Amino acid sequence: MSAYSKWLWVDGDYLLTYLWFRGAEVVQQFWLQLAALVVEFGSDRVAVAWDSDKNRRRQLWDPYKRNRLVPPEWRQEKPQLRQRLRESLVYLPLVQGEVPGLEADDLLWCWQQRRYGLLVSGDHDLWQCLDREGIAAWSPRHNKCTTQREVDKQFGGVIAMVIQKCLVGDKSDGVPGVVGVGEVRAKELWAKFAADLIFLVRDRSPVGMDTEDRWMQQVIADKAVLQRNWQLLRLGELVNTADLEAAENLLQQPIKLFDVAAARNYAATQGWFNVLKEWHHLVKAFQPIS
């Protein structure tokens, strides 16, 4: 399998959440859009990444993602819906899986290290993968592709984006930032102290950095917060060699041929969450892959 294949990588857990909260009316629209993407992008490989447990990050910061308020019915239905979506995908010529300890975006980060492709997710964390040509991210919600050029224009590059996020924190994940630093101030700090901030997030020794800037003084005082956030928010920081090998093995799975009859039968017996309701469009898009 060539590392230079054009991959289409899907964040399965983001997709599950997006489809459930957006409702039945957008489910089939999504699959038609995905089929169009496969054809337009010229993908010859498709893979879906799923979350494993999140304990690895919670060992660093126990409140990680515990602040999210979700409807009780979503919490109750999610395991069954997740399984149904995974079962639907079995009928498509793609590979799917998870790596113990990794979230889906970590797995997607592993997959794109030596490959080119299109990431399907609305999670801005995956913009961290947009540090070279040949990688793009498509948001189902906005029907928009983002590339390295946009990240460079908006933030000054991937490292700049992540460090600014580490300074601000991530409210959606329950990760606080440096006290008093918001997005505007984070941009100002990066503009003035980029090299120092890069040093701070990586270095574990005492810092003897002199500065008269009161906000940079605050950052230095909160160095432990900055470094913790780098571990939590920077994709790849908690990935080890065994993870990379396991991620690679998932992509080496043989891709099954598209069984049109089985797909049609499955589509006829499932409800609104069914990936294959538009099976005839998916056949046209995915059959060349198989």
Image (cartoon, helix red, strand yellow):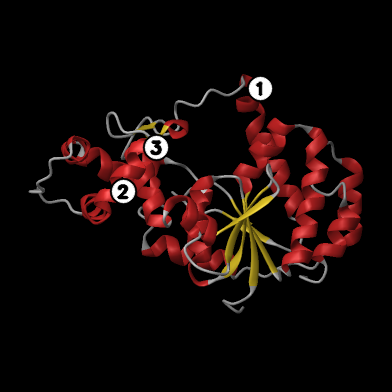
- Pointer 1: residues within 10 angstroms few (<14), some, or many (20+)? few
Picture quadrant where residue 42 is located: bottom right
Using the image as rendered, state which of residue 281 and residue 49 is in the foreground. 281
Mark 2 and mark 1: Cα distance apart in space: 42 Å
Residue under numbered circle 1: 73
Mark 1 and mark 3: Cα distance apart in space: 34 Å
- The amino acid marked with disc number 2 is Trp
Using the image as rendered, state which of residue 57 and residue 166 is in the foreground. 166
Q: Who's the residue at 47% across and 57% down the image? A: 152
Disc nearer the start of the sequence (1/3): 1
Residue 116, above or below 173: below
SS under mark 3: helix
The residue furthest top is 72
Residue 202, given in percent of the width and then of the height, sits at 24, 54
Residue 31, given in percent of the width and then of the height, sits at 79, 49
Residue under numbered circle 3: 183
Residue 159, given in percent of the width and then of the height, sits at 37, 55
Disc nearer the start of the sequence (2/1): 1
Q: Who's the residue at 58% across and 49% down the image? A: 50
- The amino acid marked with disc number 1 is Glu
Res. 254 visible in picture: yes
Mark 2 and mark 3: Cα distance apart in space: 11 Å
- The amino acid marked with disc number 3 is Glu
The residue furthest bottom is 2
Q: Who's the residue at 71% across and 68% down the image? A: 43
| 163 lies left or right of 128 | left
Q: Who's the residue at 58% across and 24% down the image? A: 70
Picture quadrant where residue 198 is located: bottom left
Res. 236 visible in picture: no
- Front: mark 1 or 3: 3
